[in-house]
Amino acid sequence: MKKVAIIAPLALVGCATAPPSTDAFVSSTVAPVVVVDKRPNIIFIMSDDHAQTAISAYGTEIGKIAPTPNIDRIARNGAVFENSYVTNSLCGPSRATMLTGMFSHMHGFTKNGQAFDNASWNWVRELGNSGYQTALFGKWHLNYSPEGSGIQTWAVLDDQGKYYNPDIITPKGRQVIEGYATDITTDLTIDWLTHQRKTDQPFVLMMHHKAPHRNFMPAIRHIQKYIGTEFPIPTNYFDHYDGRPAAAAQEMTIAQDMYEGHDLKMTTKEGSGELRFNPWTDDFDRMTPAQREAYFGALQPSNDAMNSADMSAREMAIWKYQRYMDEYLGTVAAVDESVGRVLDWLERSGEMDNTIVVYTSDQGFYLGEHGWFDKRFMYEQSLRTPFLMQYPGHIPAGSRVEAPIQNIDYAATFLDYAKLPPRAEIQGRSLRAAAEGPPPADWRDAIYYHYYEYVRGPGNHAVSAHYGIRSDKYKLIRFYGHVNAWEFYDLASDPDEMHNLIDDPAMQSQIDAMKRHLADLRIHYRDNSGPAVAEPLASPAAMARGQRDAEGAAGLHHH
Ligand code: SGN
Ligand code: CA
């Protein structure tokens, strides 16, 4: 039977999961015709902790040394969003925001470790209900599995996911799949596209990689890719955090806090394969002997050279930075190949022109700026997240979008492209106009951010809760709970955010204006968690409330 699109997609809403009604057949003297829902497919590719600075389409220094040619294809085919930000720079909260279009305090998932209510509204289920086929492969990390989320087909990594031989959870249970997580996630994706996709329905396909998340393990084929490459050391790698008490109190430096064995795969002495500090052995224990041999064998020469060199503390800090970059960017190489495989599939299948492809991450990441790895802070490298989107014929090829966007915008965007009505609860706005031409005249001129999770101890980085506002020129942040302090940056003169100007007399009128704007945004987004903007830092009420909200963010507006 010949399939021809003959009616507007909206006419199908609500009935597409049912077999085509007899109305869908039009008598014709030529051939019977069946209705096809021609709304665009959506492929939503997300990695975990991928900094904009590690994507060549963003025009970065690292991108010149470690390019991402396949992610860059999306930029060439469509748009790079130059000012793309998260709302809370942490995995679980970001994912919940992406699914619901709401800030953390509205969807209730403020910190990792909370359980997301899969029954909450999410845009993927909504598109599924309207006739889309939906699938998710890779990292979920909102709770055990997407069961009950309305996503029709899924196979997910367990929790944070393992790089080698990961546990994969499906509706049928859990199994270990031998191989490399990024490749397995891509194989599942391509297999679904090739064998399970129904050609008479549009689809939403989510491919969520674990990489380049800690503990930064590249595929065997990439383990040596950047060893010996000299990456430029960020100018503020040896930051002293003067005037920035929250930054001074963190536990996320490459030099001191990264685990020498588990993260950096450093050995104890020349000629030995024994790892330095490696508190969680499972990531390596689960590798096959052949994988272990190939992986650690490849690192042995540079580990031996490191152990035999007599390095100063400063030289060692730089060596660790270089090793971190080798590994982090090594994991990105497989992510980039994965994007290439998906784009190749689109070209081969002829679906390219009818498919929106997004590449993003759950948040950005520090690649040595301020001496750090990890994220959480409202400083640029972790506040920013990559966002590239193509839709040939609709989004102009090679465009650069300046309008500030946030991950609250994705749900509204996909409803819009799927020709579904907007939803009042969504706090973001559709990116369609900004992607296809100039943004609406009343587009936001500043973004709001709120981070909640303060945890000390291994792997949690001790970042104080904070909220703030970023405009194109300035950034104002209020830390509360553990460190109580305001920070203010002039982003044009101080893009590295090294000089907190909160007490600078010349800046007081700008600071007051930003405080008013911040208070308005908190009202606009209905966030009254944490101390109010107007409450003095050291007032007992502000301190008590800050402490309570920082520690008990779990209880915020949960619904
Ligand atoms: C783990 C990591 C942390 C990381 C969090 C959150 N420690 O706890 O370094 O900040 O995940 O990451 S680890 O030693 O267990 O790897 S997130 O992307 O899930 O938010
Ligand atoms: Ca993450």
Image (cartoon, rainbow, N blue to C red):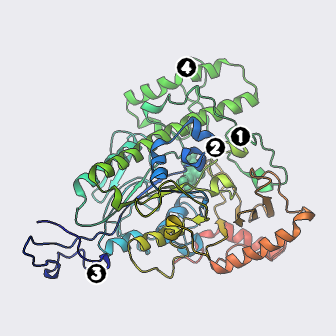
Horizontal and vertical percent for residue 142? 47, 62
Q: Which mark is residue 362?
A: none
Q: Which residue is mark 2?
A: 367
As helix, strand or loop, the secondary structure at mark 2 comes to loop
Callout 4: few (<14), some (14-19), or many (20+) C-alpha neighbours within 10 Å? Answer: few
**Residue receiving disc 4:** 301
**Vertical order, 170 against 3 (above or below):** above
In the rendered structure, which amino acid carries the disc numbered 3?
Answer: Ala
The residue shown at (58%, 23%) is 303
Q: Earlier in the sequence, mark 2 or mark 1?
A: 1
Q: Amino acid at mark 4?
A: Pro
Closer to the chain start, of discs 1 and 3, is 3
What residue is shown at x 10% (from left), y 72% (from top)?
Answer: 32
> What residue type is disc 1 on?
Pro
Residues tagged 1 and 4 counted as in contact (Cβ below 8 A)? no
- Marked residue nearer the N-terminal end (4 or 3): 3
Question: Of helix, strand and loop, which one carries label 3?
Answer: helix
- Tell me whether the residue at label 2 lies in contact with that at label 1, contact meaning CB atoms closer than 8 angstroms: yes
The residue sitting at 34% across, 55% down in the picture is 352
Mark 1, secondary structure of its residue: loop
Nearer mark to the viewer, of 1 and 4 = 1
Residue visible at 17% across and 76% down in the picture: 20
Q: Is mark 3 within 8 Å of ligand 2?
A: no
Real-space Cα distance between discs 4 and 2?
Answer: 24 Å
| Quarter in which the N terminus is drawn | bottom left
Say which residue label 3 marks.
Answer: 11
Is 142 rendered above or below residue 335?
below
